Amino acid sequence: MFLTVFTVLASLLTANAAIIEMFSDKECKDHVGTVNVWDNTCARTTGFESFVITAEGGFQQTIRAHLRNDCVVPYTQCASASATGRCTTAYNNQGASHAFSSYWSMDGCETA
């Protein structure tokens, strides 16, 4: 019993997710959805051209917006998971984004 309670408490203390609002325009005005991006995971989404992080992810987590919904390069934007409240564009000459990834990085956004 103690082991089960301890395991649940440990996972609650270490599990984090950035909550991200997605928008179909480049100015964060036309809301298309909300997604939780758990630390060190990929979250497939509908298409979006901008986003706002409304709740930060875990310690030193970095969020990437990806063109395809498989969370591989190329990506359209990279931001710290603690960069809450700021409208960030997430498109390039190939189009809108379709997924978010979250990963731990000591250096933040590095090129891929």
Image: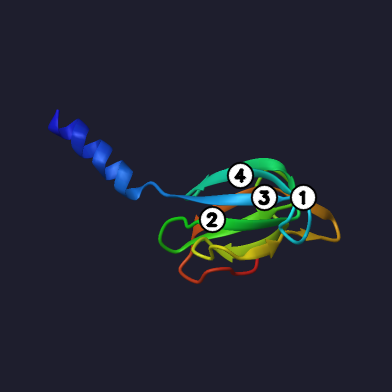
**Whole-number angstrom distance, CA of label 3 to CA of label 1:** 7 Å
Amino acid on which disc 4 is placed: Thr
Residue projecting furthest to the top = 1
Q: Quadrant of the C terminus?
A: bottom right
Mark 3 surroundings: few (<14), some (14-19) or many (≥20) residues within 10 A: many
**Whole-number angstrom distance, CA of label 2 to CA of label 3:** 10 Å
Q: Are marks 2 and 4 in contact (CB under 8 Å)?
A: yes
Residue located 86% across and 61% down the image: 93
Q: In the drawing, what numbered circle is on residue 54?
A: 2
Q: Which residue is mark 3?
A: 22
Please tell me in which quadrant of the rendered image residue 27 appears.
Answer: bottom right
Residue 5, above or below 10: above
Q: Are marks 4 and 3 in contact (CB under 8 Å)?
A: yes
Q: In the drawing, what numbered circle is on residue 24?
A: 1
Q: Earlier in the sequence, mark 2 or mark 1?
A: 1
**Left of 46 or right of it: where is 42?**
left
